[in-house]
Amino acid sequence: MNWDEIVKRVIPVVVKIETPSGHGTGFLCLYNETRTFCGIATAYHVVKHAEQWQEPIRITHYPSGTNAFLRESDRIIFPDPDRDSAVLLIGTGQLKFPDTPIQLLPTDHRLPIGMDVGWLGYPSIAAATLCFFSGNVSAWQDSRSAYLIDGVAINGVSGGPVLYSTSADGAQIVGAISAYRANRATGEALPGLSIAQDVSHFHDIITQIGTWDEANRQKKALAQQKATEPESPSSPPAPVPEPATPVPAATPTTEQSRT
């Protein structure tokens, strides 16, 4: 697997996410149909405190040198605490992303054990430097819909895209780094396992945004249809009935006058 080519393609969609309590990593996962906003995927714990306390979030896109400072009113967060996943919707134009997000692994696909994967992130020890890591899929956990990976993921990399590639499908994002579990069986930090949450929540949000787009499309089509329909002629007012001609009283005859 040529990781250099894969990483080169994925780097333009990766961002650093900073909050008052720390930082993590995220990546572009969607655009709406009219491209008025985009979605950035990450691990929920990266933005949890900022969401709960309505704190600002700064997103930096180092490849283009652009950043977005988002107050609580500048973004919409779709969280899934159970799957430690979140999508931030923000207006387009603030960050110079590529026109097309990297494809997500379909929800009905699962990587086999032993498969090579890699991931990207901004580790705390080099907070302004995007770093690459790699390992092998060690196991799949149904209970959390996540992969266990034989490889180190350190602070700051949470939310970073986990990558996989084939000659047929090219580079795909199969998950987002959620945590690292060190092995402390002997009291020392031994090699542990990284946890990569799958992309199911991101697919759910993409579907939801597609539903919004379809509703807006139908609304616009209906408005255009009404605008182009000829106006039906208004019905003429009902005729006002003529007042009845009064019948004059009979003039008494001479004989009647005399009576």
Image (cartoon, rainbow, N blue to C red):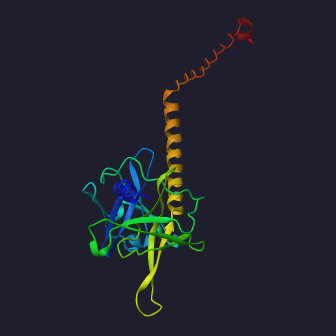
Identify the residue at the far top of this view: 254
In the figure, residue 114 lies in which quadrant? bottom right
Question: Residue lying farthest front?
Answer: 1
Residue plotted at (43% across, 65% down): 118
Against 242, residue 147 (above or below) is below
Where, by quadrant of the figure, is residue 14 drawn? Answer: bottom left
Q: Is the C terminus in the top left, top right, bottom left or bottom right quadrant?
A: top right
**Residue at x-position 38% and y-position 63%:** 26
Image coordinates for residue 56, horizontal then vertical, percent: 31, 67
Q: Where's residue 190, x and y in %? A: 42, 85
Q: Is residue 101 above or below residue 88?
A: above
Q: How many marks?
A: 0
Nearer to me, 42 or 179: 179
Q: Quadrant of the N terminus?
A: bottom left
Which residue occupies 30% across, 51% down? 96
- Image coordinates for residue 18, horizontal then vertical, percent: 31, 69
**Which is more toward the observer, 67 or 217?**
67
Of 173 and 88, which appears nearest the observer?
173
In this rendering, the answer to whether 113 lies above or below 235 is below
Identity of the residue drawn at 45% across and 72% down = 178
Q: Which one is in front, 98 or 57?
A: 98
Q: Position of residue 193 (x, y in %)?
A: 47, 78
Residue farthest along the bottom direction in this orientation: 187
